[in-house]
Image: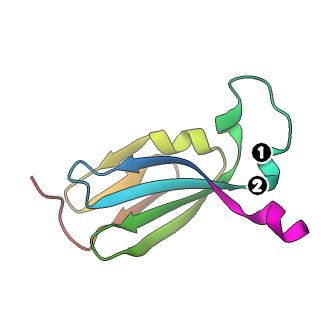
Amino acid sequence: MLIFLFYPIEYSKNYSPDKQYVLIGKHFLYQSLIPTFPGQGGDKSGFVYVYDLKEKRIIGIARIPMLSMMHEVSWKQNSVKLKLINTWNLPRSLSQ
């Protein structure tokens, strides 16, 4: 029973402009069971995954202190940057 508390729950997705890549934010199930005030849902800590939709594989993973920070993302031609967290190089350039 306790193992289900660590089941990852998707928080949000952020697609690259050409839809080749997606940034996925997840947190653990037990964090949803902790009461919070309205508007504090994004204050949960979690993980961010950069996923290559074309090759169907994970490019990178990073721990994030607040999932609401995953919206501060900038997609560049050859990389994706998550402000104050990490920068990942992309295997292919973004399409124009």
Residue drawn where x is 44% and y is 73% of the image: 58
Is 90 situated left or right of 94 in this image? right
On the image, the x and y values in percent for residue 15 come to: 34, 50
The amino acid type found where label 2 is placed reads: Leu
Range of residues picked out in magenta:
1-9
Residue bearing mark 2: 29
Q: Please tell me in which quadrant of the rendered image residue 20 appears.
A: bottom left
Which of 28/43 is in front?
28
To which quarter of the image does residue 51 belong? bottom left
Q: Is residue 6 magenta?
A: yes
Residue at the image position 50 percent from the left and 45 percent from the top: 70
In the displayed orientation, state which residue is furthest to the right. 1
Q: Where residue 54 sits in the image (x, y, percent)?
A: 27, 71
Say if 59 sits above or below 41 in the image: below
Category of crowding for the residue at label 2, using alpha-carbon neighbours closer than 10 angstroms: few (below 14), some (14–19), many (at least 20): some
Residue contact between numbered discs 2 and 1, judged by CB atoms under 8 Å: yes
Q: Amino acid at mark 1?
A: Ser
Q: Quadrant of the N terminus?
A: bottom right
Looking at the image, which residue sits at the far front?
A: 1
In the rendered image, residue 67 lying in the magenta stretch gets the answer no
Residue 3 location (% of width, % of height) = 84, 70
Left or right of 90 on screen, residue 4: right
Q: Is residue 48 left or right of residue 76?
A: right
Residue at screen point 29% across, 51% down = 16
The tag on residue 59 is none
Q: Is residue 88 left or right of residue 96?
A: right
Give the number of the disc on residue 32. 1
83, above or below 24, in the image: above
